[in-house]
Image (cartoon, rainbow, N blue to C red):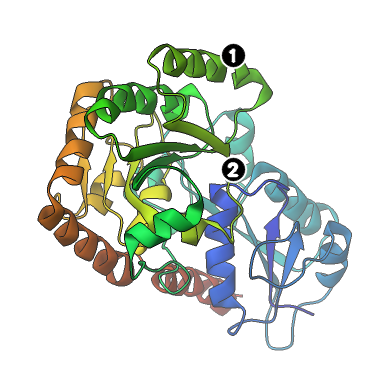
Amino acid sequence: MPELIVTNFNRNFTGVSATAAGVLRQQVPRYDLRLAGHPLPGCPAPVTRAAALRLSRRPAPGRPFVIWHVRRNTEMRTALWARDVLRRPVRIVFTSAAQRRHSALPRWLIARMDAVIATTEAAAGFVPNVQAVVPHGVDAELITPAADRAAAWAATGHPGQRGIATIGRIRPEKGTDRFVAAMLRLLPDHPGVTALVIGRAAKGDRPFLADLRARIDAAGLSQRILFPGEVAPDALPGLLQGLSAVVQLPRYEGYGMAPLEGMAAGVPFVATEAGSYRSFAQGGRCGTIVPGDDAAAAAGAVDALLSDPAAHARMATAARRAAETRFSVAAEAEGIAAVYEALWAHG
């Protein structure tokens, strides 16, 4: 019987999936664990929900119960079914990144968790029973800087000599329109730069995407602002290595891993003050924070990065160092382990 069950009930690979996968890879040598639900890159093959419930009938030797670590509403519901309906020896840990009040159903579910881990102090203010604040970390062994950034960009197959990108779902909340507005200002002055919008639009956001494409076409930049869709998890490190900047301009973000993943690849960023972006910026050493609805400011910040190779190199070095030392997934896994051990110690 396993000590730990980590759930992933979303078949799509999201930011939540990426953070769960990074931690799980760190946990494999430490715990007898199972991944339940859908596969995660670099992680053990998953078991089904039904199998996870069966595996929770008895705790592992030396443990008073099985810990279920959940991150989504559907996962909380299944874990509660195991603990409260089937009466399995289960305790439930939930990770919360949201920096706003949850709606009614998540609030009801979260209130029934045995322990909550918040990713920031701000997130901790919106949930009960917080046992620890543990920031998400990045796997700086999986994502590394390129020996030759220009060659790494050429290897992506995208046009131009340099690339910048925004990464995430294409929708207003993620600020995709802000990115496009900034690129419409920036690119005419940087003819060798290509901008990528990495992600997909859900059905309800397709009119939003169509409007963005129309604005780009009207500006004559449809060959330089590209929409390649989602990038497979195993291809993302290579893409990041080729970028000269990551640009994230959301209206809301719970945590926001894209700048941190870029930092691991030695890529500076430009971002709004959302999620944990200001902490990532490290006082401007790793990234630049700009006002939300100011396309000129965002374009100017990217222009400053692209136009000063020495400053870019300093920020790239600082970004990589911060990813390794201040925002590592190993540190996240240690913080989570302390919560598990405290639960087991109290029986």
Based on the displayed image, in which of its 4 quarters is residue 178 positioned?
A: top left
Query: Left of 272 or right of it: where is 155?
Result: right
Identify the disc placed on residue 252: none
Numbered disc 1: secondary structure: helix
Depth check, front residue: 159 or 321: 159
Q: Quadrant of the C terminus?
A: bottom right
Query: Left of 165 or right of it: where is 115?
Result: right
Numbered disc 2: secondary structure: loop
Label 2 packing within 10 angstroms: few (<14), some (14-19), many (20+) = some
Residue at 46% over, 16% down:
217
Q: Which residue is mark 1?
A: 207
Depth check, front residue: 79 or 242: 242
Can you give x and y, in whole percent of width and height, for residue 39 in the image? 73, 61
User: Callout 1, which amino acid?
Assistant: Pro
Question: Residue reaching furthest bottom?
Answer: 62
Pointers 1 and 2 in contact (C-beta within 8 Å): no
Can you give x and y, in whole percent of width and height, for residue 302 in the image? 22, 38
Query: Left of 135 or right of it: where is 227?
Result: right
Can you give x and y, in whole percent of width and height, for residue 318 in the image? 20, 63
Q: Quadrant of the N terminus?
A: bottom right
Residue at 43% over, 27% down:
176
Residue at 26% over, 26% down:
188
User: Callout 2, which amino acid?
Assistant: Glu
Q: In the picture shown, does residue 190 fall above or below 117?
A: above
Which is more N-terminal, label 2 or label 1? 1
Label 1 packing within 10 angstroms: few (<14), some (14-19), many (20+) = few
Work out whether residue 101 can be spotted.
Answer: no
Q: Which residue is mark 2?
A: 230
Query: Left of 291 or right of it: where is 336?
Result: right
Can you give x and y, in whole percent of width and height, for residue 278 in the image? 24, 45
Q: In the picture shown, does residue 249 fall above or below 28?
A: above
Depth check, front residue: 48 or 289: 289
